[in-house]
Image: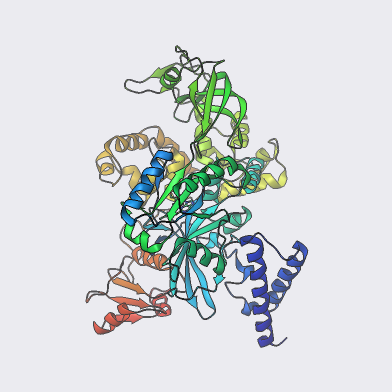
Amino acid sequence: MAATDAAGQLEQLRQQVRYHDHRYYALDDPELTDAEYDALYLELRQLEEEHPDLVTPDSPTQRVAGVAGSQFAKVRHRSPMLSLQNAFDEEEIRAWDQRVRGIVGDEVTYVCELKIDGLAMSLAYERDEGGARLVRAATRGDGQTGEDVTANVRTIRSVPLRIQPLDGLPDQFEVRGEVYMPLDAFERTNRQMEEAGRQPFMNPRNSAAGSVRQLDASITASRNLQTFMYTLDPSGPAGSQWDVLEGLIEMGFRVNPNRARFDTLDQVIAYHDHWLTHRHEIGHEIDGVVVKVDRHDQQLELGFVARSPRWAIAFKYAPEQAQTVVEDIVCYVGRTGVLTPVAKLRPVMVAGVTVRNATLHNEQMVNEKGVYAGARVTIQRAGDVIPEVVSVVEPRTGWMMPTHCPVCGSEIVREEGYIAHRCINPFCPAQQLERLRHFAGRGGMDIEGLGPATLTQLFEKELVREPSHLYRLTLEQVRDLDRFAEKSAQNLIDRIEASRTPPLSRFLYALGVPEVGEATAEVLAADFGTLDALREAGEERLVEVDGIGPAMAKEIAAFFAGNGSELVDHLLEAGVSPRGEKPAGPPPEGPIKGKTVVFTGSMERMSRPEAEALVKQLGGKATGTVTAKTDYVVAGPGAGTKLEKAEKLEVTVLDEDAFFDLIGR
Ligand code: IVH
């Protein structure tokens, strides 16, 4: 086939597949049978294979485009991504309605939407010859800056890679909404996690968030995430929220069908109550409804308070509750030796899941609530929180923590001024095992296939007692474990091997330094850059770090001076080598060092935040304004006033290729 014919036919096939993807994934209303669709898709794939030079990045076959890299670049949102004020009962929603009417008068219409329990996402589109294409997907982050998760979000089939924008939208615009995991996908994911010996996700929202932040986009693709979109920024031709929703549907986005528009608050309350009763029939979790003033001119008049609009409110559902009986109270020993009492419950369904345990936190809490073995209790489960006991029918006090560790038999102490009871034996097997789980688990070294069940076996056979021992495991040793065969054993060995060079922040978290959670680990890694620098830092240097208080600094310094020192040495001896997250010492000599660079217009090879991060890494400064002190302006298609200013000030202007040539990439 001549190349021009092929190009035409490919475009046609792509359009057909896009159309049927949209019917299936966005509208839930397919026209083709699965077999017909598969045949069409295959035809496209085959023709593309014959003409690899004609494959376009927005082709439906190119959703899994690769790997996000070792970290996600930061992305500044076009306008901040806001949060919502909450109303928890009728009184609060009525008060809000009164405030709204007080400002815009009585002529007000409300749009009601379900509050999807997922994670907020912003999709940036840019116009080109064929319409507009998805250029970036970013998480909400702190509202101003999020993380670039484009490679992963591209794999979500209801996210269109190419659209026909509404007339009146500018060249660049963002569509925002929610990415969530449907309940059936959640159950499937957790089954797979358990089969792979990994810790299952707590709830669909965590699972969706974890799936979006995968380093390997093909994993995201396998998780069957879904979307509902509800914001258009800027809103272009839409004069109301209802218009926005219709416009989004017209452009091919998936919009929640259970939306409604009302003139009175009584109708809003009836909508809220209706979905409270029917919330388990829709295949995904919601945690309330969102009420929005429909008209944009009224929204403008209402404005914002702090970081939430006055024109919208989340009318939340109370956590769901159920009654059951406490069969026993047992104590778990955590990684730091802290004992946590847990109520073993007669199994009961709450909010669609079977609950068997409820946390009781500590001895004081058990007695404040009056919990004991045999007590009849009301428990509740709120979204992501571990189920807890709300009240006891006939409360009794007098429950006491055991005096000796249920695992190692050592004495249990309660330190002066602390609520928690602790097993003080650092060699307590329960603590050792928990430390191993933490090390290998999510947020830490994240070694797939090394879940609690496998670690327990390795620990009980005394093959692994501390993290460094993982790196001396042999194929034979793993193969001999329950549920392992030659191939799965080799896979695990390979994954352990591959975990030898973790990013410094993950390594720090994995070590289990007291007080150091994921966020603090990132702060430390960014500040110190290398493990050596952090190990050498004393308490005084640590408190200088933004976000590290004196108590934390003390714990961290004590860890590296004490038990942690040996743990780290053993890991380094075993060949683990954490990767620094900024160049140690002065940045390398190069053409960008000490220079100020401004990016303007769009870029092809990397996102602007990535390019800016690169400049920083090379010792330069990336800024947003062109001045006489600017050394380079890197201008791409669509560059405007910044380019004019650069020319006026005679600043060197480079195009994208010239910039990459300059830095030798
Ligand atoms: S509107 C300025 N609509 O709730 C208004 N938010 O607590 C921006 N959410 O971050 C949000 N469903 O992640 C809106 N139908 C819906 C929503 C929704 C879920 C989430 C969203 C937002 C959070 C605010």
- Give residue 334's position: percent from left, percent from top: 48, 29
Frontmost residue, 520 versus 294:
294
Quarter of the picture containing the N terminus is bottom right
Task: Tally the numbered discs.
Answer: 0
Q: What kind of colouring is applied to the model shown?
A: rainbow
Q: Can you tell which quarter of the image residue 9 is in?
A: bottom right
On the rendered structure, is 211 left or right of 1? left
Relative to residue 557, is residue 402 depicted above or below? Answer: above
Question: In the rendered image of this protein, does residue 167 appear above or below residue 22?
Answer: below
Would residue 214 be seen by someone viewing this image from the given angle?
no
Residue pushed farthest front?
Answer: 106
Looking at the image, can residue 480 be seen?
yes
Q: Position of residue 585 (x, y in %)?
A: 31, 57
Residue occupying image coordinates x 34% and y 37%? 556
Which residue occupies the foreground of this view, 662 or 79? 79
Quadrant for residue 624, please give it: bottom left
Q: In the orientation shown, which residue stands out farthest toward the left?
A: 628
Residue 511 relative to residue 321: left or right: left
Q: Quadrant of the C terminus?
A: bottom left
Residue 188 position in % (x across, y down)? 66, 46
Residue 521 vertical position relative to residue 554 in the rendered view, above or below: below
The one nearer the camera, 182 or 109, is: 109
Point 58% across, 43% down: residue? 279
Can you give x and y, in whole percent of width and height, for residue 37 in the image?
73, 66
